Amino acid sequence: MEGNCDTGKPDQPPNLPPDEKIAELAEFLEAFSDFSRIKILLVLQERELRPCEISKIVGLSVSAVAHQLRVLRDKRLVRYFREGKSVYYALDDEHVSAILKTALEHVNERR
Amino acid sequence: MEGNCDTGKPDQPPNLPPDEKIAELAEFLEAFSDFSRIKILLVLQERELRPCEISKIVGLSVSAVAHQLRVLRDKRLVRYFREGKSVYYALDDEHVSAILKTALEHVNERR
DNA sequence: AAATCAATTGAACAATTGTTCAATTATGGA
DNA sequence: TCCATAATTGAACAATTGTTCAATTGATTT
């Protein structure tokens, strides 16, 4: 962007995905970047839950949970379906739990 | 946290990691939550690079890159080593690229 | 020693984020 | 219909974030 930067090497093509795709990636991964949302995702790993149940378990107001669930829905980390008066939320697919699992491994294996 | 929330079920134990551990998880995953940082991680997937090279490839100022590399270092997504005047950066381990790979899969399989 | 290139840092600023509170929508039961 | 429960929404606010700019540190060469 600005400097010289003597690269001895032949300036190999970077082979990056297009910015558009990277933006999608960022959108998705951004959803994992908050303490409350991670907590919500972890409890959803166990079983489907309603917002009011999540609220009790993670210790957040129902409103705060609803706001976070909206983020998780919009970025496709969770699915949901209505059943009577309630709405049940679940992890969207195995990618989501795979990322949680890998990340947990990473922070657990440390000096 | 606040309401009643009639759970018909026997209030199964949540079985969550301690908040401390979740905080570590969040710290780690937060580092994936920015467009520029993801771009940096993606180019580091190909090979070790110096900040000035990264700057040219991703189109950010050297300063901005350095600031982001500090974040990535602090949260242990990248390693680095000095060689003469330069400092080379690389992904910390396979967990990091595994997460990128899984996330890329997730955004690629669209419905 | 000075000069040069590379990398890091700190302050400042706009932009974004997560929560609370209050109001609103949705569903089912009396 | 009205009421109770569940969920969502919007505005507001403090807190955090990412970038730029300028200054500084580090390592090598002459």
Image: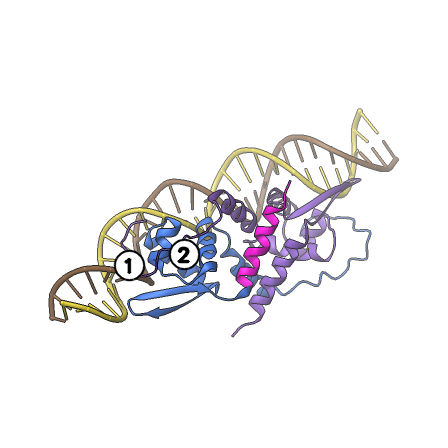
Chain colours: A blue, B purple, C yellow, D brown
Label of residue A68 in the image:
2
Question: Can you name the residue that lies furthest to the front here?
Answer: B10
Most frequent secondary structure within the magenta stretch: helix
Circle 1 Cα neighbour tier, 10 Å, few/some/many (<14 / 14–19 / ≥20)? few
All told, the count of numbered labels is 2
Task: Identify the residue under disc 1.
Answer: B6
> Can you give x and y, in whole percent of width and height, for residue B109 in the image?
57, 71
The alpha-carbon separation of the residues under discs 2 and 1 comes to: 22 Å
Q: Is residue A103 magenta?
A: yes
| Nearest to viewer (mark 2 / mark 1) | 1
Check disc 2 and report its element: helix, strand or loop: helix
Mark 1 residue type:
Asp
In the visual, does B6 lie left or right of A54?
left
Compare residues B52 and B88 and report the one nearer the observer: B88
Compare residues B109 and A91 and report the one nearer the observer: A91
In which image quadrant can residue C1 be found? top right
The chain identifier of the residue carrying mark 1 reads B
Quick check: can you spot residue B59? no
Label of residue A64 in the image:
none
Stretch in magenta: A95-111
> Can you give x and y, in whole percent of width and height, for residue C28 in the image?
24, 70
